Image (spheres, grey):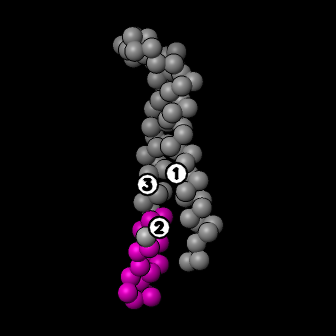
Amino acid sequence: MPKIAFATPALQPVLWWLAVITLALFLLIQLNLFWTTMRWFRSSSRAPVMQALAAFEIRRNRELFWTLLPLLATLALFLWMLIGSPIT
């Protein structure tokens, strides 16, 4: 994989922290998407939402799986970056 670094060694942690902040924001967005997907399938959802789910044959288990998969992959990347990084 290509490596990106600043010429000045003192600035190298800046790139690492930028990546950590970006991954954390991406995790928050994905958590929001997962939470919103969970709300679709509540019995208290509005009738148009339930009709759309039925019309497009959206199944709860499949939708939750495909929504949760990128979240778990990003979380694994985030943890790998935190644990495996020499910069602390």
- Residue 53 visible in the picture: yes
Q: Nearer the viewer, residue 14 or 73?
A: 73
Q: Rounded to the nearest whole Å, what is the CA distance between mark 1 and mark 2?
A: 18 Å
Query: Residue 32 in the image: x percent, y percent?
Result: 46, 40
Query: Residue 40 in the image: x percent, y percent?
Result: 46, 23
- Residue 46 visible in the picture: no
Q: From this viewpoint, which residue is outermost toward the front?
A: 1
- Provide the residue designation for mark 3: 25
Amino acid on which the number 3 mark rests in the picture: Leu
Point out the tag, 1 or 2, that comes first from the N-terminus.
2
Query: Residue 15 in the image: x percent, y percent?
Result: 42, 73
Question: How many neighbours does mark 1 have within 10 angstroms: few (below 14), some (14-19), or many (20 or more)?
Answer: some
- Provide the residue designation for mark 1: 74
From the image, give the main secondary structure of the stretch colored magenta: helix
Is the C-beta separation of discs 2 and 3 under 8 Å? Answer: no
Q: Secondary structure at mark 1?
A: helix
